[in-house]
Amino acid sequence: MFDLSPQDWIAVALSLRIALVATAVSLPFGIAMAYVLARKDFWGKSLLDALVHLPLVLPPVVTGYLLLITLGRRAPVGAWLADHLGIVFSFRWTGAALACGVMAFPLVVRPIRLSLEAIDRRLEDAAATLGANSFWTFATVTLPLALPGVIAGAMLGFAKALGEFGATITFVSNIPGETQTISAAIYTLTQVPDGDRTALQLVLVSIVISMTALVASEWFARRAGARLHGA
């Protein structure tokens, strides 16, 4: 169906790898942040909420540049991580995953927060009266009730990470086989003669993957909702 070169398929595989890693790493932090924003009241909460959603309103290139001057090989934090822990993000696929995770984070947090806010707190209070501590109540009552939101957040984050371009190309460049994702490959193909046909095929591949993720998200969310309601 798709007449793509091995290098193009590498870009597809790398995009899936980066999106999956970005989603898997950001999801636990997204759940924790959603819980804090949904359940806690403290000074500076509005500021924290704004910072969480800042990647949505900032140009992606700005986010990528901020990552570069913070975690680049010669940046203070990036140099320390490289020299002491051997961790390098700039111009590596791990850096692309980090950039995608940062850009997707607000989309992970938002639906989880809404799910947490919609939970009947009396159910959690009932668990507490039966002797469950806070962690056990969260693990056995709160998190299962918020599962549709968690699934929606994970899938939205995955879709965002899969299509991210500006932040990744600024932070990790466009290196074939290392940081060249589907979006970067499409951009490269639009700049060369006779690249439109391959670019169109990559666009179709991207649409298929994204649609599959969204349909899977809807299916899992409905299954989770049916189980919660005893259907």
Image (cartoon, grey):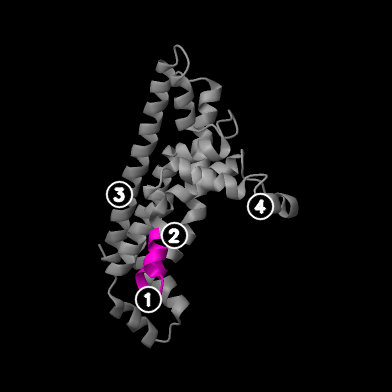
Q: Amino acid at mark 2?
A: Gly
Quarter holding the N terminus is top left
Q: Residue furthest top?
A: 194
CA neighbours of label 3 inside 10 A, class few (<14), some (14 to 19), many (20+): some
Q: Residue 17, position in %: x, y?
A: 53, 41
Mark 1 packing: few (<14 Cα in 10 Å), some, or many (20+)? few
Boundaries of the magenta span: 35-50
Q: Mark 1 and mark 3: span between their CA atoms? A: 32 Å
Q: Earlier in the sequence, mark 1 or mark 4?
A: 1
The spot of residue 158 in percent (x, y) is 42, 46
Front position in the image: 192 or 138: 192
Q: Main secondary structure of the magenta part?
A: helix
> Label 3: which residue?
218
Query: Mark 1 and mark 4: span between their CA atoms?
Result: 34 Å
What residue did someone put label 4 on? 76
Is residue 118 one of those drawn in magenta?
A: no
